[in-house]
Amino acid sequence: MSENLTARTIRINGAEGDEIEAYQARPDEPGPRGGVVVIHHMPGYDRETKEIVRRFAELGYDAICANLYWREAPGAAPDDAAATARAQGGVPDARLLGDVEGAIRHLRGLDSSNGKVGVIGYCSGGRQSVLVACNLDVNAAVDCYGAFVTGTPPENSPLQVKNLVHQLPNLGCPLLGLFGVEDRFPNPDQVEELHKILEANAKEHEFHSYEGAGHSFFSVDRPAYRPQAAIEGWQQIKEFYGRELGA
C-alpha cells in the first residue's frame, strides 16, 4: 500500500500516433513495480474512473487510463463525450488496441516499471480488456462484467461490436472475470460459454459470480452498486495482480 501518490492529466501517443489525453496516478515511493491500464466504461472517462486509477496507485502500481473518446469530444464533459461515442457505435476495436498499446508502452517506459503490465476494464471496457489480452503483450487481464465477449449484441445496442469468440484461443495471459448473477449482458449462460471456450483451449482463467449483483456492481455512484460484491471483487483483483504483476 502507498500512503502518498501523485495523480495528473498527461498526453500519450495512441493509435496511429495520435496524441490523446490520459489520467495517470503513481505512488511516490521508488519502484520497481507493476503497472495497470484501466479501460473506462461506456459512460466515459469520468470521476469514477479516475478514482479507480488512484486506487491502483494506492495499492502500489503505476496506473493510467486513456480517454478513449478524446478524438470525438476533446475537453467535453464525460456525459457529452459518451453520448457522442454511443452515437457512433462505440470505439472501434483497432483504435482501442492502438490507444491501449500506447498506454502499455508509457507504463513500461517509466523508471519505476518492473516490466509487467495488467489491464482491467468495466462494462464495455471488460470486453476490451479481453480483446487486449488476445492481441497485445500484457501479463494479466481483468474483465469486470464485459458484455459481448460471447453472445451477440441486440439490434438496439449502442455498442456496434462483434463478440470475441474467434479470438479467445489467442488469449495470452491469465484472465480474472468478475460477474453479477443478475446481469443480462453478460448473463450467466454467456459467462459459462466463455469459461468452456477458455477451458477447451487450456487458457488460465479464474471467474467469480456474485449473487444479488447485476451489471455495474462496482459503480459506487449508481443504483446498481452492490457493496459486498464490490468488496469481494476488489479483494480478488488485489490477490490476482499481486500474483501476476508483483505487489
Image (cartoon, helix red, strand yellow):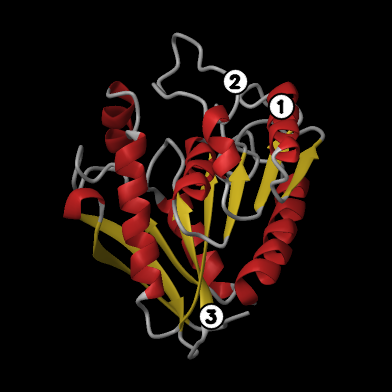
Q: Which residue is mark 1?
A: 193
Describe the element under mark 3 as helix, strand or loop.
strand
For the C terminus, the quadrant is bottom right
Mark earlier in primary sequence (3, 1): 3
CB atoms of marks 2 and 1 within 8 Å: yes
- Dot 1 amino acid type: Glu
Density class for disc 3 (Cα within 10 Å; few <14, some 14-19, many ≥20) is: many
Q: Which residue is mark 2?
A: 151
Q: Residue at x 54, y 52 (%)?
A: 120
Q: Residue at x 64, y 27 (%)?
A: 186
Per the rendering, the mark at residue 43 is none
Name the one closer to the observer, 154 or 169. 169
- Dot 2 amino acid type: Gly
How far is the residue under mark 3 from the one under mark 1?
35 Å
Mark earlier in primary sequence (2, 1): 2
**Dot in front, 3 or 1:** 1
